[in-house]
Amino acid sequence: MDKELYHGGRPRSEQARTAILNAVDDLLVEVGYAAMTMKSISERAGVSRQTVYRWWSHKAEILFEASAADAAEELAITITGNPLDDLTSYVEALVRFLAHSPAGAAYRALLGEAQHDLAVAELLSAKDPLGDSARFVIEQVIGKEVRSLRIEQATSLLIGPSFFWILSGRDPAGLVPRELAENFIYDLQARQLR
Amino acid sequence: MDKELYHGGRPRSEQARTAILNAVDDLLVEVGYAAMTMKSISERAGVSRQTVYRWWSHKAEILFEASAADAAEELAITITGNPLDDLTSYVEALVRFLAHSPAGAAYRALLGEAQHDLAVAELLSAKDPLGDSARFVIEQVIGKEVRSLRIEQATSLLIGPSFFWILSGRDPAGLVPRELAENFIYDLQARQLR
Amino acid sequence: MDKELYHGGRPRSEQARTAILNAVDDLLVEVGYAAMTMKSISERAGVSRQTVYRWWSHKAEILFEASAADAAEELAITITGNPLDDLTSYVEALVRFLAHSPAGAAYRALLGEAQHDLAVAELLSAKDPLGDSARFVIEQVIGKEVRSLRIEQATSLLIGPSFFWILSGRDPAGLVPRELAENFIYDLQARQLR
Amino acid sequence: MDKELYHGGRPRSEQARTAILNAVDDLLVEVGYAAMTMKSISERAGVSRQTVYRWWSHKAEILFEASAADAAEELAITITGNPLDDLTSYVEALVRFLAHSPAGAAYRALLGEAQHDLAVAELLSAKDPLGDSARFVIEQVIGKEVRSLRIEQATSLLIGPSFFWILSGRDPAGLVPRELAENFIYDLQARQLR
DNA sequence: ATTTAATCGAGACGGTACGTCGAGTCTTTTT
DNA sequence: AAAAAGACTCGACGTACCGTCTCGATTAAAT
């Protein structure tokens, strides 16, 4: 049985919940993260301010919940078995996500906020869409188990260059995913990780 | 002649200027970027609010001016001529800067802000301490001219992994600068950039 | 038969009703009228908020119901037949009620609210504990019927001075009930009301 | 010299001050005391909310300042020297003030609030328009010095009946000022206060 | 020496969002 | 029905920071 135990009272409004998540998605695109306030979110969602605060404590928390599923989906690739192809398409997905997707914009805003807000930093480290997706791809490509620190470092090697490129404001058109995938393979081979 | 033409009136107070820059440095360490307001800056500097606004328009601008010199200095290394050693000490300096230095904290805060504030993004792209320092080191190591896009990409290769590691909240102790330097050299060799 | 016709459904809980009235009494003493909210009343009574609203519309209404009986009792004196003694003990009871009794505090709060809330004003004019008690004492003392306007004026003469003294924040210790009773008798004699 | 010493900063806006006091006067008449909020005051005055809070802490404080001058003026009578006439015209003024004047409505609202708000009670006891005016009239009528407690009691005798009559919601038309003045004189004579 | 003009400290101003609180109402299940 | 529980809308609360403004006082170079 998937029903919660009844604890009395009016049940949470699913309609309000989705209206708020949608409002956040829309506002991020329309006015940007900085100009998106708790007030504007509640008004856009047609919901009282109190209802927003009842379930989330920051706009970062709402934005995270609103974009987490999209992020995971956009960073998932279908594995073909060819390492270079798979890594290339992952880097392509990564660049597309960070540079062009609304969910990626949300991620960048959150990661930016995390640099000076501990609560947001904890939010992101609890569930890290970039790290998770990269770890998955690398494990598939390597084909065997790897020590956890090693895979964390491999993750940074794979994601880092594109990540810095885009967050530092460089033009994403200058990135060449295939070359980045090749570099990653060189490094693996040199270290004989597999 | 580097003096402005005289337009009458009391000259700008150098004392006020340095008091403000120092106040920003102090407050960043003491209360963090988010809690640092224009009001608290002016009060800490013992200066009127208007005086701050007269010369800078955002706290980001002040912080940038206050930390730019420190950043450049902390990211400068002395070249020995040994590529692996030089790259290793650069990565060490980079990690020290990003993870442990007040100037690095300022840089991370500004880069975070740049993700959702165009004005800050332009500030950073006008003078990019990470890119500049990496470019310099790479040019010294390679020893000859390189096409500008190539060097930009090499920059991302060198900086990216540490950058992602730290900004995503991972423990800087897990980074191994020598390995990152080696990886960079593998990539260069594989591409025969020199 | 004084029972309502049965209309089906669960009957009103007498337990809830008295719990609410007691809660209001307690809260008035503990936190005062202003800080007493419908929420705090329901929580103190261990009753749902809706149950309070189902039977009363304002906290003033509850407080009035909770204190009316006490007020009437505290303002009732036993008649001895000696006019000066009876009037004196009435004024004493009046001062004790207004200045020191919880029911009197409730009355003052309600009368205060009545100055800017029409609903409360109507509540009080429907059943006026001060007027009623004074009218009774005066009728006993005079010993015969009197025109209704006359008795209303006599009421104000008897109650007014103490009432103003206490409501304007003066120290009740400064009041001398016997003198007030004497004054009232002077006035009656001068007008030869009896 | 009636100029304050200069303490730096932009001077207080007299325009804002009077706009706020006028707004309170208007709102009291239009919507009543209870519905008059700090927000509506600031909006009506065309002033920011902060400006209201900068100079007053409660709406009671503003209302008091806005009506104090009117109250004093409305309760001042010209002394003719004939005790009965003077006392009668004072009672008339008192009834007119309490029952029909906007300033009187303000006074009643404040006195009501004072019954459950200590801050308001202190406000009123600091400067009591009713007490002050009655004291003045009584001193003129008696024509000589009187012990301070005596005059306080005389004050309550003079004001009390009308005060109770009106605050308890009775029709002011039922009051007969001349009779009240006469009663007051009877009491004085009986006590031989003069 | 006086004038001119931009600076400085101080602090009031209009705005706007903050996060909280109380008001009534509504929607569940249980009695 | 009535009751308990608690989510909901609404709107005011008092505070904080924003960026602008208006004061008198200061400080130089130009007159």
Image (cartoon, coloured by chain):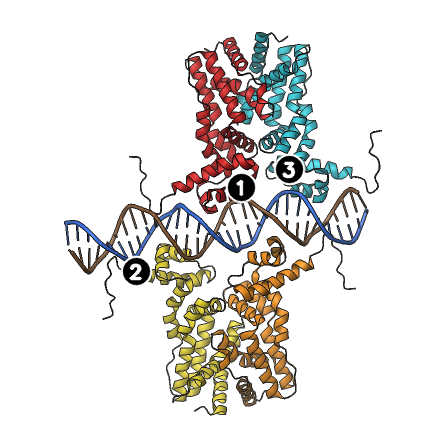
Chain colours: A orange, B yellow, C cyan, D red, E blue, F brown
Give the side of residue C63 with respect to residue D132, left or right: right
Amino acid on which disc 3 is placed: Leu
Q: Residues within 10 Å of mark 3 (few under 14, many from 20)?
A: some
What subunit carries mark 3? Answer: C
Identify whether B128 is placed above or below C158: below
Amino acid on which disc 2 is placed: Gln
Q: At 66% across and 43% down in the image, what residue appears?
A: C39
Q: Measure the alpha-carbon separation of dots 2 and 1.
A: 46 Å
Q: Quadrant of the C terminus of chain D?
A: top left
Check disc 2 and report the residue beneath it: B15
Check disc 1 and report the residue beneath it: D37
Residue F28, percent from left and from top: 21, 58
- Kindly indicate the quadrant of the structure image that contains residue A42: bottom right
Q: At 58% across and 56% down in the image, what residue appears?
A: A43
What subunit carries mark 2? Answer: B
Q: Circle 2 sits in a helix, a strand or a loop, which is it? A: helix
Residue D65, percent from left and from top: 45, 34
Give the side of residue D139 with respect to residue D1, left or right: right
Give the side of residue D143 with respect to residue B187, left or right: left
Check disc 3 and report the residue beneath it: C27
Residue D122, percent from left and from top: 49, 32
Q: Circle 1 sits in a helix, a strand or a loop, which is it? A: loop
Q: Is the Cβ of the residue at disc 3 closer than 8 Å to that at disc 2?
A: no
Residue C100, percent from left and from top: 60, 27
Q: At 36% across and 55% down in the image, what residue appears?
A: B50
**Which circle, 2 or 1, is nearer the viewer?**
1
Q: At 62% across and 34% down in the image, what residue appears?
A: C29
